[in-house]
Amino acid sequence: MTTEILNTRRLLCPLPVIRTQDKVKQLMSGDIVEVVGTDPGLMQDIPAWCRINGHKVLDLRSGDYEYTVVLEVVKVDI
């Protein structure tokens, strides 16, 4: 299991979600991604994307005009 930090600072919707999706494709199930950005929409957009795609939100943090969503990658073998 690895932990990756994804910097989406200064990017606006939909780019943080797109970058998150691209990063998750490179990772294994159980890996952790910390998405850090300055767009407050990140706090709703990334959890919604996780719900749709089956990933698990572990933590939401905000402060000093910076927002972080921590998620666990869940991949299902078909």
Image: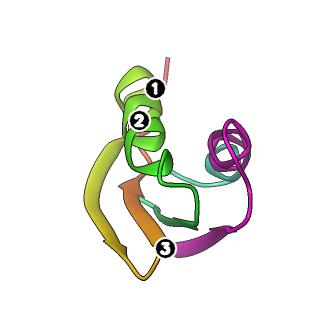
- Secondary element at tag 1: helix
Disc 2 designates what residue? Answer: 50
Give the secondary structure at mark 2.
helix
Residue at 50%, 74% in the rendered image = 2
Question: Cα distance, mark 2 to mark 3?
Answer: 20 Å
| CA distance separating discs 3 and 1 | 24 Å
On screen, residue 77 above or below 71: above
**52 with respect to 60 (left or right):** right
Badge 2 vs badge 3, beta-carbon distance below 8 Å: no
Picture disc at residue 42: none
Q: Position of residue 69 (x, y in %)?
A: 40, 60
Residue shown at the point (39%, 49%) measured from the top left = 43
Looking at the rendered structure, the kind of residue marked 1 is Asn
x and y percentages locating residue 62 in the rendered image: 34, 70
Q: Position of residue 6 (x, y in %)?
A: 63, 68
Q: Amino acid at mark 2?
A: Cys
Q: Residues within 10 Å of mark 3 (few under 14, many from 20)?
A: some
Q: Which mark is residue 66?
A: 3
- Dot 2 surroundings within 10 Å: few (below 14), some, or many (20 or more)? some
Give the residue furthest to the front.
Answer: 65
Q: Which residue is the site of mark 1?
A: 53
- Mark 3: amino acid: Glu
Residue 73 within the magenta-colored segment of the rendering: no
Q: Nearer the viewer, residue 5 or 66?
A: 66
* Range covered by the magenta-colored residues: 1-22
Circle nearer the viewer, 2 or 3: 3
Please tell me which residue lies in front, 74 or 34: 34
Label 1 environment density (alpha carbons within 10 Å; few <14, some 14–19, many ≥20) = few
Q: Is residue 39 left or right of residue 1?
A: right
Mark in front: 3 vs 1:
3
SS at badge 3: strand
